[in-house]
Amino acid sequence: MPIYLRNMAKDHRMVKHPEILPFASPRPYGNNASMDSYKCFYHTMDVSTVESLQYAFRTIKAATNDFSESNKLGEGGFGSVYKGNLQNGQEIAVKRLSNDSRQGEIEFKNEVMLVAKLQHRNLVRFLGFSLEGTERLLIYEFMPNSSLDHIIFDPNKGALLDWPARNKIIKGVARGLLYLHEDSRLRIIHRDLKASNVLLDEEMNPKIADFGMARLFNHQETEGCTNRIVGTYGYMPPEYVINGMEKLEI
């Protein structure tokens, strides 16, 4: 089933419409069906559930050795990712958002609320978050083989990926997308799927990560409006970048 996304910022009939899911109850404007999706999703995530996912900042700071360079796994547009070890020995990956990050407060809260409800073997497992002052941290399970881009764009590591391994990764990503598009309670469009957002575990099983740009739909919706174009250039359809229109075949 096709889903159409339209960037309303390019239209003189600009409609205020929340780009992503906020913590607070959605405001009553924009497309009613979309609003119902946001409200339904928000109200099923009660305060106690959110609080149970919150880690003390000092705990994560200690786990990452004060966010040392030796613990850094990588860096992106939203900040840096660090490896950490909790006191119980569990390995974690910590996404530390930079103060000048393109991912703002709403995107951060969107990712917390969204990934906390998703459960699938091909989606990275969300463990919790931490907030203190300007510090915003997202905590995930640690993926020992890093992200797919570290392998396929490396001449040496890329040679280690035989066709059975590549086929396994392709099928795993497809299963994860099928869950997001069809099998989860609400239809979720990732909107920033790329090699760096596909993580690999110790057995090279792929897991989709980074839901800061995700958009929710209910299963009856076939069209949505956005205030801005989001995604990564090079991975976005040209018609979406140029005209603000995208057709997603689901």
Image (cartoon, rainbow, N blue to C red):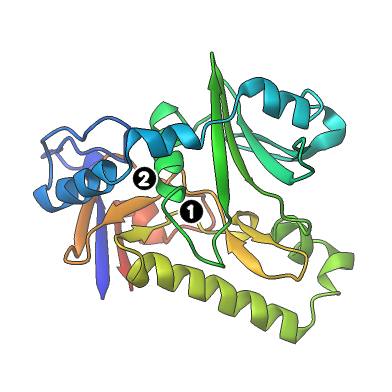
Residue positioned most to the top: 133
Q: Secondary structure at mark 2?
A: loop
Q: Where does residue 142 sit, x and y in percent of width and height? A: 71, 50
Q: Where does residue 44 sit, x and y in percent of width and height? A: 28, 46
Which amino acid lies under the numbered mark 1 shown in the image of this protein? Asp
Mark nearer the N terminus (1 vs 2): 1
Q: Quadrant of the N terminus?
A: bottom left
Question: Residue beneath label 2, please?
Answer: 229
Q: Is residue 83 above or below residue 100?
A: below
| Residue 227 horizontal side relative to residue 205, left or right | left
Residue 166 circle label: none
Which of the 4 image quadrants contains residue 123?
bottom right
Q: Where does residue 147 sit, x and y in percent of width and height? A: 70, 57
Which of the 4 image quadrants contains residue 68?
top right
Who's the residue at 41% across and 59% down the image? 238
Who's the residue at 37% across and 58% down the image? 189
| Residue 76 horizontal side relative to residue 243, left or right | right
Q: Is residue 217 visible?
A: yes
Question: Residue beneath label 1, please?
Answer: 192
Which of the 4 image quadrants contains residue 135?
top right
